[in-house]
């Protein structure tokens, strides 16, 4: 059964009272982790889980020590006084001791919020991502090239998977038109295609990574060749391969990145985006990089790296990406990540910069039921490093 919620749970202090699923990516794959309050601990998937549980055990020990001292009338040493989260632990266990706590371990998953009406995808970018005939889009061309499989066979397999899972997808996110311009049918088609891609590249994760990165590189080339961004941005990105061999810096790429994100938004692929850290106004938008960042990459003697955060809200591939990840695969639909990575690969000249990224699915709403997870944001952390 296809579901939108994710059942993997691990505790984290990453975000105060917020639900977050983490998927660690090397462009070709993801690793999903479900985060929840430390009051609802379950078995985790990440090495950090044991550390968190140990921390919880320490808090419990210190809380018990403080509680015992208080009950016996003994002074509590400031070094062992319960503070912060430990105070909540103490309250929970004392209340359970005298009054009992309400059992919450078997709460069912809540109903998901009603889906918004499907957006209509538009513009020249859409058929480059996925086309109705499954013949000319970049994704299927790159898969055919890397697997040496005819496009017609890949298209037939994609339609077969799409037909099989269509009823389940439509029950939760009904589309209005069976065309890729309909947001939810686009999502369904991307899900079906990536399932076919997963079967075509079953175990070679380097090849999966290459396939994903090639989508981004080819998409960037098509965006430039069709003039979907400004001539100034195109000249900037092409200067690294020109006869003059001009060096593209990180700060040079910022207007190009913003134009590409605007392009995805104007296509209705997403509703909004954020470039940079939302908690640091000086490091957002056009100010996301500065001259010191440029030096980290341009210095021949340096092996520095620079991070950049990008949030994409309500991406049209969100449902399919969550579903595939929930099924246990690390190979899910993504167009924005590899395209931005392709831009930053040009920094410093050909072969100078190495780009990796991680992506996270974020539910911004605190939900008391730890099984509830309804994200609307795909959050990226890019790392640009000098090779």
Image (cartoon, rainbow, N blue to C red):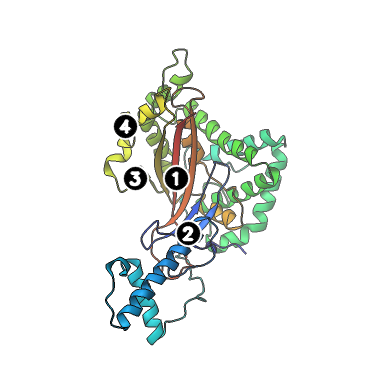
Q: CA distance from mark 2 to mark 4?
A: 36 Å
Residue 124 visible in rendering: no
Which residue lies under the disc numbered 1?
Answer: 380
Distance from label 4 to label 3 (Cα)? Answer: 14 Å
| Residue at x 43%, y 19% (from the top left corner) | 239
**Mark linked to residue 277:** 3
The answer for how far apart the CA atoms under marks 3 and 1 are is 11 Å
Q: Dot 4 corresponds to which residue?
A: 290
Q: Residues within 10 Å of mark 3 (few under 14, many from 20)?
A: some
Q: Residue furthest top?
A: 243
Q: Position of residue 363 (x, y in %)?
A: 42, 58
* The label number, if any, that marks residue 39 in the structure image: none
Q: Secondary structure at mark 1?
A: strand
- Say few, some or many: other residues with alpha carbon within 10 Å of mark 1 (under 14 / 14 to 19 / 20 or more): many
Q: Which numbered disc, 2 or 3, marks the residue closer to the eye?
A: 2
Residue at 46% over, 68% down = 370
The earlier-in-sequence mark between 2 and 3 is 2
| Residue 324 x/y as whole percent | 59, 54
- Tell me the CA gap for discs 2 and 3: 27 Å
């Amino acid at each position: 059964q296809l579901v939108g919620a994710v059942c993997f749970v691990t505790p984290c202090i990453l975000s105060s009272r917020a639900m977050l699923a983490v998927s660690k990516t090397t462009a070709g794959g993801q690793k999903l982790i479900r985060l929840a309050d430390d009051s609802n601990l379950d078995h985790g998937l990440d090495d950090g889980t044991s550390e968190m549980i140990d921390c919880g055990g320490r808090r419990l020990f210190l809380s018990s020590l403080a509680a015992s001292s208080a009950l016996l009338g003994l002074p509590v040493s400031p070094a062992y006084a319960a503070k912060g989260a430990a105070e909540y632990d103490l309250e929970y266990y004392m209340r359970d001791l005298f009054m009992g706590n309400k059992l919450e371990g078997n709460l069912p998953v809540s109903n998901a919020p009603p889906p918004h009406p499907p957006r209509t995808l538009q513009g020249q970018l859409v058929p480059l991502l996925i086309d109705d005939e499954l013949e000319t889009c970049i994704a299927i061309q790159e898969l055919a090239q890397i697997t040496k499989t005819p496009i017609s066979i890949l298209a037939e397999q994609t339609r077969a998977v799409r037909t099989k899972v269509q009823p389940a997808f439509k029950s939760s996110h009904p589309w209005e038109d069976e065309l890729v311009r309909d947001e939810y049918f686009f999502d369904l088609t991307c899900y079906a295609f990536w399932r076919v891609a997963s079967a075509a590249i079953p175990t070679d994760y380097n090849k999966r990574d290459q396939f994903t990165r090639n989508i981004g590189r080819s998409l960037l080339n098509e965006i430039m060749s069709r003039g979907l961004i400004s001539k100034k941005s195109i000249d900037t990105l092409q200067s690294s391969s020109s006869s003059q061999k001009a060096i593209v810096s990180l700060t040079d790429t910022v207007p190009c990145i913003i134009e590409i994100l605007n392009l995805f938004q104007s296509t209705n692929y997403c509703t909004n985006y954020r470039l940079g850290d939302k908690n640091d106004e000086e490091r957002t938008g056009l100010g996301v990089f500065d001259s010191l960042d440029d030096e980290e990459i341009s210095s021949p003697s340096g092996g520095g790296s620079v991070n950049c955060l990008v949030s994409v809200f309500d991406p049209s591939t969100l449902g399919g990406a969550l579903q595939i990840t929930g099924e246990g695969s690390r190979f899910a639909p993504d167009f924005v990540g590899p395209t931005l990575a392709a831009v930053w690969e040009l920094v410093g000249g050909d072969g100078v910069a190495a780009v990796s990224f991680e992506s996270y699915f974020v539910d911004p709403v605190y939900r008391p039921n730890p099984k509830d997870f309804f994200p609307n944001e795909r959050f990226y952390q890019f790392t640009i490093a000098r090779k």
